[in-house]
Image (cartoon, rainbow, N blue to C red):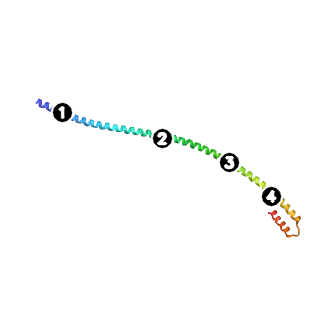
Amino acid sequence: MAETMGDALGLQILRAVQELGTRMERVEVQVNHLSTRVDALTERVDRLEARMDRVEAQVNHLNTRMDGLSARMDKQEKWMDRLSAEFVVFREDVRGDLRQWRTELQEDHRRLKKRVDVTSSTVVLMASVLRGPTEFSVELEAHLSELHAG
């Protein structure tokens, strides 16, 4: 009986060891599977880090370009402000020149009109001196009087 009990106990121990072996194999499979997953995740993280590095490099490049464009835009705005101020000064200068030219033209026109009036009066006077009984002198005097009046 002791032998039978020893055999039964040995069988139980053997089964327990076999079950532990089976469980150990399952655990090893799970550990291997987890190890494979960790390796895959590590590769994925490495790829994401590389991708982030590329994106960061692109962002830095774009920031540099934006800084350059911003500087150019500031320069253009200053240039436009300067041109605008220059245009206002130029416009005022042109207005002043136009006023001066208008005044000069009006003065020249008054002087010329006086000379035309003097000349017209002289011609009318000469025509009246030269007037004779002819029809030509009467028409000339009438024409010159119209010019003088107009």
The quarter of the image holding the C terminus is bottom right
* For marks 4 and 1 on the same chain, the one whose residue lies earlier in the sequence: 1
The residue pinned by badge 1 equals 14
Going by the numbered disc 4, the residue's amino acid type is Lys
The circle on residue 113 is 4
The crowding category of the residue bearing disc 1, from other C-alpha atoms within 10 Å (few below 14, some 14 to 19, many at least 20), is few
Label 2 residue SS: helix
Q: Is residue 103 left or right of residue 33?
A: right
Going by the numbered disc 1, the residue's amino acid type is Leu
The residue pinned by badge 2 equals 59
* For marks 4 and 2 on the same chain, the one whose residue lies earlier in the sequence: 2
Mark 3–mark 2 Cα distance, whole angstroms, equals 45 Å
* For marks 1 and 3 on the same chain, the one whose residue lies earlier in the sequence: 1
The crowding category of the residue bearing disc 4, from other C-alpha atoms within 10 Å (few below 14, some 14 to 19, many at least 20), is few
Q: Tell me what residue is drawn at x 51 percent, y 40 percent.
A: 64
The crowding category of the residue bearing disc 2, from other C-alpha atoms within 10 Å (few below 14, some 14 to 19, many at least 20), is few
The residue pinned by badge 3 equals 90
Q: Tell me what residue is drawn at x 27 percent, y 35 percent.
A: 28
* For marks 4 and 3 on the same chain, the one whose residue lies earlier in the sequence: 3
Mark 4–mark 3 Cα distance, whole angstroms, equals 34 Å
Q: Residue 65: x percent and y percent? A: 52, 41
Mark 1–mark 3 Cα distance, whole angstroms, equals 110 Å
The quarter of the image holding the N terminus is top left
Viewer-closest of 63 and 141: 141
Going by the numbered disc 3, the residue's amino acid type is Phe
Mark 4–mark 1 Cα distance, whole angstroms, equals 142 Å
Q: Is residue 46 left or right of residue 137?
A: left
Going by the numbered disc 2, the residue's amino acid type is Val
Q: Is residue 8 left or right of residue 73?
A: left
